[in-house]
Image (cartoon, grey):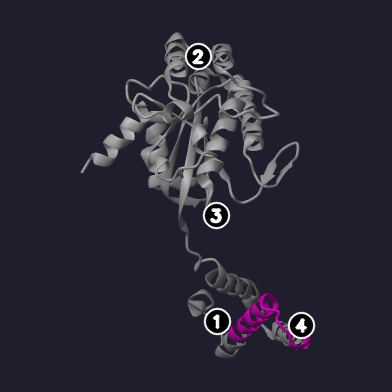
Amino acid sequence: MFLSRFPSADWASLHTLTEIGSLGMRHFVCRKNNRNRQFHKGKRRDQRKRLRNKLESLPLRFECLLDSVFTLSVQSMFFQKRKKKVFDSPIFVVDALGFSAAIERSDRDTIIALGRQLERHYHRLRLAIPFTLVINTARRVWGTREFSTFQLNDMFIIYSRVWKDDFALRYLITASLVYQRLLLDGFVPRGALGHGVVLAGEGYLIGSGFIDAYKAAEQRSEDTRNVCAIQISSAFIQTVPPSAHVQPLICFYRGHFFVNPVFLVDHVLGTFDRTAVLDHLAAAGANEQKLSATKQFLEEFEDYDAAAKPNSLSRQFMMGRRSEP
């Protein structure tokens, strides 16, 4: 390849170029694996001197090729060997109903305002996530690694690259806080909690975990399609431990589990009762069908205390699931 690009090249110069590339790579690796600083310090100084002398002896036509050789060597060593990590994770997806219609009606000027609104909304949503440690600036929110976020138009996705044993509790709390935050921001929230395998990359998120949460959020049954709440998939409900600290965050309605929208009280967001939820939905522009379905859900769902009774609907549902082959 070198001779085809430089037909007048001589073998001595090519040998010198190869030696320089080798010296440069050893110098790079030596810097990365600096286990014995005193030993490597003198060795690197000698290598830099040899490299400088070799460069001075090269014909001008080889100078541009040296950078290419060194760059390709570094890329093959450090970047091409990286493998994507597949992990099991809870997945929380939530979107703002009606925002897509606003985007569709927008023109050149209003789409800019909608984009800025989404940025502000995404910022506040990340602030609502219960990170162990969070740093908030005017433009960005940094949080610890137990939660990662991904934005897909008006849909917001939360997942985790690092596994925690109490993820069921963490995600139920997260879903409750984000739901209340969306209501306060004037959105109509609907979403779901799922669980499964996830592969996250630059600009994409795929896997059975995302599909599980997406179907629970967007492909609901006729009974729960217009309910503005966070539904829980069967895959996620299997990860919930029989704990009095976790299960009060869950409610049961018409054969499906949901995040209880009125149980959690946050000192920043305030108290959310059934009336407050409906008032915020009406203020956000929810249509009559969604308001009616959500009102019926709030009046009829079975909470933790009702589920503890011997003949509760959720108990009968779970008993029927266990008896299935």
Please give the label number shown on residue 84: none
- 10 Å neighbourhood of mark 3: few (<14), some, or many (≥20)? few
Indicate whether 185 appears above or below 45: above
Are the residues at dot 4 and dot 2 in contact (C-beta closer than 8 Å)? Answer: no
Are the residues at dot 3 and dot 2 in contact (C-beta closer than 8 Å)? Answer: no
**At 70% from the left edge and 40% from the top edge, which residue is drawn?**
140
Q: Which residues are magenta?
A: 18-45
- Nearer to us of marks 3 and 1 is 3
Looking at numbered disc 4 in the image, what kind of residue is underneath it? Arg
First reached walking from the N terminus: tag 4 or tag 1:
1
Q: Residue furthest left?
A: 325
- Nearer to us of marks 3 and 4 is 3
Q: Label 4 vs label 2: CA separation?
A: 65 Å
Looking at numbered disc 1 in the image, what kind of residue is underneath it? Ser
Residue that numbered label 1 is attached to: 8
- The answer to whether one can see residue 259 in this image is no
| Residue 124: quarter of image | top right
Are the residues at dot 3 and dot 4 in contact (C-beta closer than 8 Å)? Answer: no
Image position, residue 207 (x, y; %):
40, 48
Indicate whether 268 appears above or below 52: above
Looking at numbered disc 3 in the image, what kind of residue is underneath it? Val
Residue that numbered label 2 is attached to: 286
Indicate whether 53 appears above or below 123: below
| Residue 125: quarter of image | top right
- Nearer to us of marks 4 and 1 is 4
